[in-house]
Image (cartoon, rainbow, N blue to C red):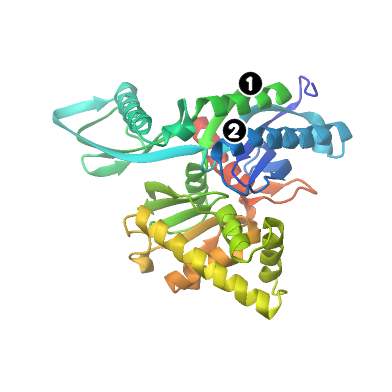
């Protein structure tokens, strides 16, 4: 279906690919603040038994549904702003388990000062990408990703002669330290999603990003003085952890426990279906579950959360909850399971003021929305990140 014509305002499509939902948003980046013109979120049914390959195949159907919702918005003409737009670029943002990322530190010392040109820094990025690809190819993770494709090669920080700088190009130094982020996704998975988007919206270019990098980039745009903090993305099947030190991503790791694993665990312990477990969580969140049901649910929460905390600590070499007084936790999570996860974090840390769910209230006026558009914090986070990226390239 072709519904884009020349001489129309160019907007960008954001495609958020998770394991509990797929969200599409049309965003106008022409102004100082991104404006979300239209968005649609399609929930993904929870598998009784988590199988990544089966979930990946099912995602294409959910993506088709989301694309159809946007096409219906154009056809209906219900949103005036859409009638005068065409999609220029698309940005696919992958959450776990659809990507894998690594932050690598690199230090070089020279006998005498050298000029650091573009070729020098590209060489570092190339080397880190190759090294990370080889690590993944020789690990069990390759069975899930298959043919891998680098989607992010970001120079997070550069220090010259011991001092950080945001403008290292054509400078001279004898000591060079770099922090590099590399993110990989399945090439086949990315290509199939990109193809569906290109066929529907006739985009010029399709880009790919990881959600942790998007969240970190977005948080930098908020008026916060925090330099050391933790980002927790509690996705459907996994929890991603980003450790930030001196405002720079220091480490990324994941554990295979998330929203969907909690719901499956509750259903099993309470001997109910997944739908009933979801209903009980909903009633619990608004304090409408009976006393007996509430007690059983809290016991099940406690058992699961003990395992969740242990796995997070184990994967992070016991660094996650250390030095808690110097850290704040920024959490992205679906609202239906926010209460148990957020409450657990607050109890673990012992300071309610140290845990922040990234909501539209926290984001504030950094994002604008068209009338009747449901405010989605994930699209907002990704819009903020992309807005910073667009501004950087315009400088």
Answer yes or no: is residue 9 visible. yes
Q: Is residue 261 above or below residue 87?
A: below
Circle 2: element type? strand
Residue 7 in the image, given as x and y percentages of width and height: 76, 21
Quadrant where the N terminus lies?
A: top right
Residue name at image x 67 percent, y 42 percent: 23
Q: Is residue 23 above or below residue 122?
A: below
Residue name at image x 26 percent, y 44 percent: 163
Q: Mark 2 and mark 1: span between their CA atoms?
A: 11 Å
In the current view of this chain or complex, which residue is farthest to the left?
111
The part of the image, by quadrant, that contains residue 80 is top right
Q: Residues within 10 Å of mark 1 (few under 14, many from 20)?
A: few
Total count of labels: 2
Q: Which residue is mark 2?
A: 91
- Left or right: 89 as drawn, with respect to 155: right
Residue name at image x 33 percent, y 64 percent: 322
Give residue 204's mark: 1
In the current view of this chain or complex, which residue is farthest to the front?
271
Residue 249 in the image, given as x and y percentages of width and height: 39, 47
Circle 1: element type? loop
Q: Residues within 10 Å of mark 2 (few under 14, many from 20)?
A: many
Closer to the chain start, of discs 2 and 1, is: 2
Answer yes or no: is residue 361 visible. no
Q: Nearer the viewer, residue 295 or 162?
A: 295
- Left or right: 137 as drawn, with respect to 44: left
The part of the image, by quadrant, that contains residue 363 is bottom right
Residue 165 in the image, given as x and y percentages of width and height: 32, 40
């Amino acid at each position: 279906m072709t519904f884009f014509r020349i001489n129309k305002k160019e907007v960008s499509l954001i495609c958020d690919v998770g394991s509990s939902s797929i969200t599409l948003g049309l965003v106008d980046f022409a102004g100082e603040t991104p404006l979300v013109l239209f968005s649609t979120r399609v929930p993904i049914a929870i598998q009784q038994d988590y199988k990544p390959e089966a979930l990946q195949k099912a995602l294409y159907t959910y993506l088709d549904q989301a694309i159809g919702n946007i096409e219906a918005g154009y056809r209906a003409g219900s949103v005036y702003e859409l009638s005068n737009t065409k999609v220029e670029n698309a940005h696919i943002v992958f959450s776990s388990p659809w990507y894998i990322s690594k932050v690598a530190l690199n230090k070089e010392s020279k006998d005498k000062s050298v000029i650091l040109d573009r070729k020098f820094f590209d060489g570092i990025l190339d080397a880190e990408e190759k090294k990370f690809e080889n690590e993944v190819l020789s690990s069990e993770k390759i069975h899930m990703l298959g043919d891998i494709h680098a989607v992010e090669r970001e120079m997070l920080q550069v220090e010259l002669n011991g001092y950080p700088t945001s403008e290292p190009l054509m400078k001279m130094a004898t000591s060079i330290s770099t922090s590099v982020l590399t993110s990989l996704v399945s090439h086949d998975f990315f290509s199939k999603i990109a193809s569906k988007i290109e066929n529907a919206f006739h985009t010029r270019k399709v880009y790919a990003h990881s959600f942790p990098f998007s969240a970190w980039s977005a948080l930098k745009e908020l008026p916060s003085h925090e330099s050391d903090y933790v980002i927790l993305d509690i996705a459907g099947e996994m929890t991603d952890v980003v450790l930030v030190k001196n405002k720079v991503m220091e480490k990324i790791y994941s554990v295979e426990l998330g929203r969907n694993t909690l719901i499956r665990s509750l259903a099993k312990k309470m001997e109910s279906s997944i739908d009933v477990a979801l209903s009980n969580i909903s009633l619990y969140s608004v304090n409408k579950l009976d006393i007996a049901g509430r007690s059983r649910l809290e016991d099940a929460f406690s058992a699961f959360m003990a395992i969740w905390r242990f796995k997070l600590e184990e994967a992070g070499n016991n660094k996650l909850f250390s030095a808690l007084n110097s850290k704040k936790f920024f959490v992205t999570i679906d609202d239906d399971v926010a209460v148990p996860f957020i409450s657990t974090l607050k109890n673990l840390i012992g300071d309610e003021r140290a845990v922040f769910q990234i909501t539209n209230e926290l984001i504030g006026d950094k994002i604008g929305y068209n009338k009747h558009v449901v405010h989605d914090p994930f699209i907002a986070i990704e819009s903020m990140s992309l807005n910073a990226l667009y501004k950087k390239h315009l400088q």
